[in-house]
Amino acid sequence: MMRPFAPIPTAIALIIGLAIWFVIPVPDGVAPEAWHLLAIFVATIAAIIGKAMGIGALAMIGITLVAITGVTNPDSPKGAILDALSGFSNPLIWLIGLAMMISRGLAKTGLGNRIGYAFISIFGKRTLGIGYALTLAELTIAPITPSNTARGGAIIHPIMRSIADSFGSSPEQGTSGRIGHYLALVNYHANPISSAMFITATAPNPLIVDLISKTTGGSFSITWTQWALAALVPGLVALLVMPLALYFLYPPELKRTPDATQFARDKLGEMGPLSGQEWIMIGVFAMLLLLWAGIPAMLFGPGLAVNATTVALLGLSILLISGVLTWDDVLKEKSAWDTIVWFSALVMMASFLGKLGLISWFSGVIQQGIASFEMGWFAMTLALVAIFFYTHYFFASVTAHVTAMFGAFLAAGIALGIPTPYLALMMAGASSLMMSLTHYATGTAPIIYGSGYIEMGAWWKAGFIMSLINLAIWITVGSLWWKVLGYW
């Protein structure tokens, strides 16, 4: 009989959670409820990392513990359960799940394979070339796609999967290592870099612009052009380095595919002309891209702006009405429903850590700690950015992280004498680059992780290594470029 959980990882997670709750004293200035929620959150993350149980099961247990303990609302059991389930009302979470459901249409209609073969016919001679093709596609649509989840998860990821499938590389067959593992890593790690390059490349960036203006009292603000120009050089360098770095870290089994281009052309010939259902899929994806990018609102005014999750619902509804997908198809997309459950739990806990004041307390401690070392402004910048960056391990939402900590860290840096434009640009870049760290770091992560090509250990290892590489590029190349632009 199979055990419902892995004993050792479960024991470790329990010990960590109980130690934080009962053994480690609640710091001055921290509410006991915030500290106890931290215990539940850290124990849940530890259990996920150790694979104590399925991630959806762990998420349900975490939600249950939040509701039973009442850490978010001690005086009201009803309020506690509403808080525990609040993550399910987060539109971003449903955008993630809906994008995964929509992408099922690519496989069902065969359009995904057609797109994959088309890419292979152009870039298929080398696996590394395919990696750069995905990166270029990500960069091309980034300036007009404010949802990095829609871009990396709903647009690029289905293409990546189609390419991998065409080479017989899939988690189901145990052949991810042939090419899919590498391409999935490239698919994901292009997303944080492209998000860092444009204000309109991810939802939190406009919030960052607003926080910079408010924190500086309007004395410094960033326009779209200034952001794009400042991120241009470090961003391009990072995009050039990333596919090659991952290629050496996780080399695919298939490196040369000299016959792949002709093979792909032959397959396209066998498929014949586009079917009616494929044309519907093309129309839906074109509509999604235009609406996610906000093109109608740009051309005709904000009255035509549509929420990204509403757009995803519209796309799925069209596929259901047209018969491209059936409700049974949607129900069979188990990874989408699983993702909705576990991501809701993590976002809920991370959100309440901020609401209960734990994050603000932590930021104040960091400010005092950095000031006590009496370092130069450049060293203080590195320290502030590193702490801000790596605390993202505790967040399942970039927006929540930015909302909770960006203003406090920026204000601390300005008070410490760091040049405001330099610090603002460095933290703005870090706010997107930190998406690389975990499989719950941003909306794109659970989509690609949920496809099964990358084991959790490999995901976290690659995320940490790429975080070091990306930060090094922003600190070196970015600093030199910003010196040329006169920002310090």
Image (tube, rainbow, N blue to C red):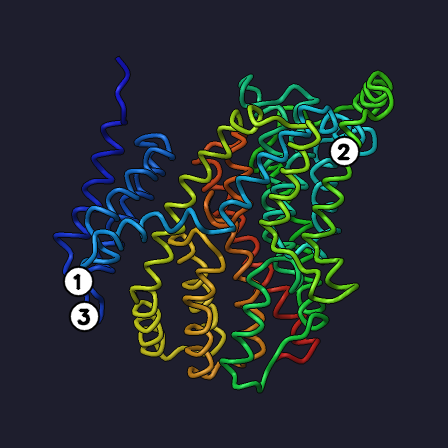
Query: Quick one: quadrant of the N terminus?
Result: top left
Q: SS for tag 2?
A: helix
Which residue is nearer to you in this view: 80 or 323? 323
* Image coords of residue 206 (percent x, y): 59, 67
Q: Earlier in the sequence, mark 3 or mark 2?
A: 3
Residue at numbered disc 2: 280
- Residue 394 x, y percent position in the rendering: 37, 53
Counting from the top left corner in percent of width and height, residue 232 is at: 71, 63
Residue at x-position 47% and y-position 64%? 402
Amino acid type at circle 2 is: Ile
In the displayed structure, 62 sits above or below 405; it is above
- Left or right: 135 in relation to 447: right
Q: CA distance from mark 2 to mark 1?
A: 57 Å
Residue kind at label 1, given as amino acid type: Val
Question: In which quadrant of the rendered view does residue 226 lie?
Answer: bottom right
Residue 198 left/right relative to 211 = right
Where does label 1 land, which residue? Answer: 26
- Please tell me the numbered disc located at residue 28: 3
Q: Quadrant of residue 172?
A: top right
The crowd level at tag 1 (other Cα within 10 Å; few <14, some 14-19, many 20+) is: some
List x then y, in percent, for residue 444: 55, 45
Q: CA distance from mark 3 to mark 2?
A: 59 Å
Distance CA(mark 3)–CA(mark 1): 7 Å
Which sits earlier in the primary sequence, circle 2 or circle 1?
1
Packing grade of label 3 (10 A; few <14, some 14-19, many >=20) is: few
Kind of residue indicated by mark 3? Asp
Name the element at disc 3: loop
Single out the mark in the foreground, 2 or 1: 2
Residue furthest front as drawn: 321
